[in-house]
Image: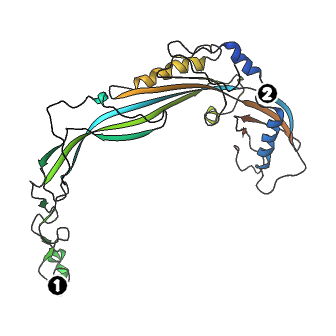
Amino acid sequence: MEQGTSLFSDSSAPCDTSSSDCQNYRNVVLIPKEAARDAVRRYVSSSYCCCTPRGEEPVIERLTQMPIYKYKLETFTETRHIEKICKPYTGQRIDAQDGEALPQLWGIEVSTPKMFHEGSKKIPLPRSGEIKTCHKCGGRGRCKCTRCGGSGQFRCRCSSSSRQKSRNKRCPACSGSGRKRCSKCSGRGRKICGLCKGEGRLFYFQQLAVKWKTLRSQVVSDPLEQELSLPLTLLQKVTGEVITMDGDVTVQPLAGFADVPEISDASGRLIQEHQMTCGPSSHILKQRQTVEMIPVAHVQYGYRGKNLACHVYGLERRVFAPRRLHNLACSIM
């Protein structure tokens, strides 16, 4: 198996990756010494707030390779449901109802987007439209104003103000009448119906709402070296070399990773979890599982008379150090 090869195997049989291939990947020096030195040099240079020290280079004393596996499962799903829509009737065309039953939920033909590209679509169902009188306004197009109760006026605050009466002054808001015109209905007592927008009739129809979504889950294996202090959450944010990829409508648990039990266990568990999330209204269109080997190297180096250590990880060659240098701005590049 060549590094970075993509394998698409038949879903009828478990995807098999031999243990010897995995062991060969472990023996490969995934982060060369020069690449580790460049990463440490960038890390040291960014650690000083004032200026970058010149004339000194970090000296790599020991480089320990400890690659880690990352398993990722992607499930592309399509979810459907029927929505009942109500709109003001403004002359929409209504299909003749010929007595035929509406199509089943999954019997409607819908063009599928590119796999693992999320999106949504709404399709009006034929022969589902009908016109009804607006139940909110009774077909009149206007409703009683809720602010003034249909009177067109409401009580002014000055009528209950003893201070205003004691001064014997006319209220500028109501001109002393104690009643103000309702601004919400302009004094009419009724306003345009918010449901039918003054049309008096409603257009009811059904539409199919389709949503495409990708479920993503990933698991990082435990380090081969027990002294690894690099947080595993950081490894989920970087990329590695793809050593196995399997894609089909439904994939099978991976086999051949007996020496990395986290990968085999995660494969079967996550596949089952993704399948359980799909019910009558959701179908799986495509699944894809990938195993990456993330290069990780523990670097022990000397710099300015001190013995220091850090981890270089991922194809991005990021650096993590549990102990900060002097004047260090941040511990992660």
Q: Is residue 175 above or below residue 15?
A: below
Residue at image location 54% in from the left, 21% down from the top: 266
Q: Is residue 132 visible?
A: yes
> Quadrant of residue 38 in the image?
top right
Residue at image location 76% in from the left, 26% down from the top: 65
Q: Is residue 308 visible?
A: no
Disc 2: CA contacts within 10 A as few (<14), some (14-19) or many (>=20): some
Q: Is residue 314 above or below residue 9?
A: below
The amino acid type found where label 1 is placed reads: Ser
Badge 1 element = helix
Q: Nearer the viewer, mark 1 or mark 2?
A: 2
* Left or right: residue 275 compared with residue 313: left
Where residue 136 sits in the image (x, y, percent)? 13, 52
Badge 2 element = strand
* Left or right: residue 205 compared with residue 280: left
The amino acid type found where label 2 is placed reads: Thr
Q: Are marks 1 and 2 in contact (CB under 8 Å)?
A: no
Q: Is residue 188 above or below residue 49?
A: below
Where residue 276 sits in the image (x, y, percent)? 40, 23
Sequence-first tag of 1 and 2: 2
What is the image's colouring?
A: rainbow
> In which quadrant is the C terminus drawn?
top right
As drawn, the label of residue 166 is 1
Residue that extends furthest to the bottom in the rendered view of this protein: 168
User: What residue is shown with label 2?
Assistant: 64
Q: Nearer the viewer, residue 279 or 152?
A: 279
Where residue 188 sits in the image (x, y, percent)? 12, 70
Where residue 120 sits in the image (x, y, percent)? 39, 40
Marks 1 and 2, how far apart in space?
Answer: 92 Å
> In which quadrant is the N terminus drawn?
top right
Q: Nearer the viewer, residue 19 or 59?
A: 19
